[in-house]
Image: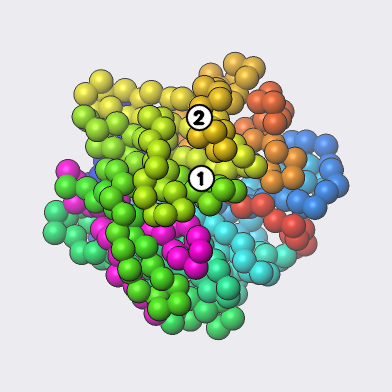
Amino acid sequence: MNSAIQIKKLFYLFVALALAIGSCRKDETIVPSTTTPVAPGASGPIKGFFLLNEANMGSNKASLDYFDYTSGEYHKNIYPTLNPTIVKELGDVGNDIQIYGNKLYAVINVSHLIEVMDVSTGKHVATISIPNCRYITFDKGYAYVSSYAGPVLIDPNARLGYVARIDTASLTIKDTCVVGYQPEEMAIRDNKLYVANSGGYRAPNYDNTVSVIDLNAFKETAKITVGTNLHRMKLDSQGNIYVSSRGDNKNVPSNIYIIGPTDKVTDVLNLPASNMVISGDSLYVYSAAWSNIANSNTITYAIVNTRQKSIVSRNFITDGTEKNITIPYGLAINPETREIFVTDAKNYVSPGRLHCYSPEGKHKWDVETGDIPAHIVFTRQKLTSL
């Protein structure tokens, strides 16, 4: 493990020793947007996508990129260009990005806020303050945001987390619901919100439950015991919820569990997962599993048939170009073209790279991104301000 990766690991595991926590949007010199042609222009319902770069914790360098399908151009670091009067930019650690209606929502974890933008212009609309916010999902006019609730702090006595319910019309928090320890991704099924609880701050005493919230009452009604240190959560076309477990980096390996329609764990795939996304009846998975025992990363790519609940490919990159990726980090599938996108965090402290593959797994193009490119959301509305 090289020194840069070790720095990243220490930031995420021992951030309490490295940071003084606050809602931090430091005044810094604005880095202008850059534009790079990377592909031929194309027409279609998907006009482009936004990519949120996390940037290393404490650097206050979260940034936003945009790929324009109509021109084939990649625009890096667009937020300060589109919002020149907001000198403090996005903040510290971009943890999720989603679109709902005509708004773009960026979850900025360590700055404790949701940045809301107009999806067609990229202009700032509002800021919603939520401590240690993690992920966001939407249903029936509401946004649901998972929150660690307390400070960014490795603490065996860390408090339970919660989910905040936000009215997307007024952009105000209407209620909160306490869940498990350090909640992560969420999924909605049958008017219930499922929340993956990690317990990451309480290591080695991780959480292993999924909280179930009744959305009518907005109360936790059950906890489902699943696996150690839960993280990702995806819903398939059959109503099954796929939940990833990080394990403990030692004796408990990463894995994927399936919660069936009766809220029981029905299957265990015995497949490690760092990130995953569903496209049609395929679950795309990559794993960059770090072992504290072997002192190395094991990187794998796979496809799971969600109808058969079986692994059908051990490498969705089929031309050997996965060797050009140092540390896979972000993963996305274009819902129309089925193009595959994988981001490379490289050494975590310098610009990363975005790789585009055909649906058959052949490399098409790649481009430089911001630091730690992580989260992609596709848009059917062209960004008009660039």
The front one of 194 and 74 is 194
- Crowd rating for badge 1 (residues with CA inside 10 Å; few <14, some 14–19, many 20+): many
Question: What amino acid is labelled 2 in the image?
Answer: Ser
Is 287 drawn above or below residue 26 in the view shown? above
Q: Confirm whether residue 134 shows in the render.
A: no
Please state the total of marks drawn on the protein image.
2
Question: What amino acid is labelled 1 in the image?
Answer: Ala
- Between the residue at mark 1 and the residue at mark 2, the CA separation in whole angstroms equals 27 Å
Q: Is residue 317 magenta?
A: no
Label 2, on which residue? 310
| Image quarter hosting the C terminus | bottom right
Left-right relation of 157 to 78: left
Is 289 drawn above or below residue 10 in the view shown? above
Query: Which percent across, then down, holds residue 241?
Result: 47, 49
Q: Secondary structure at mark 2?
A: strand
Label 1, on which residue? 374
Residue ID at (29%, 43%): 227
Left-right relation of 234 to 46: left
| Precedes in sequence: disc 1 or disc 2 | 2
Query: Which segment is the magenta one?
Result: 175-204
Query: Which percent across, then down, holds residue 267?
Result: 40, 38
Q: Is residue 180 magenta?
A: yes
Left-right relation of 225 to 218: left
The front one of 77 and 146 is 146
Query: Which percent across, then down, holds residue 225?
Result: 28, 50
Residue ID at (24%, 33%): 252
Residue ID at (50%, 40%): 276
User: Could you say which quadrant of the image residue 363 lies in?
Assistant: top right
Left-right relation of 100 to 382: left
Q: Confirm whether residue 47 shows in the render.
A: yes
Is 186 drawn above or below residue 232 in the view shown? below
- Crowd rating for badge 2 (residues with CA inside 10 Å; few <14, some 14–19, many 20+): few
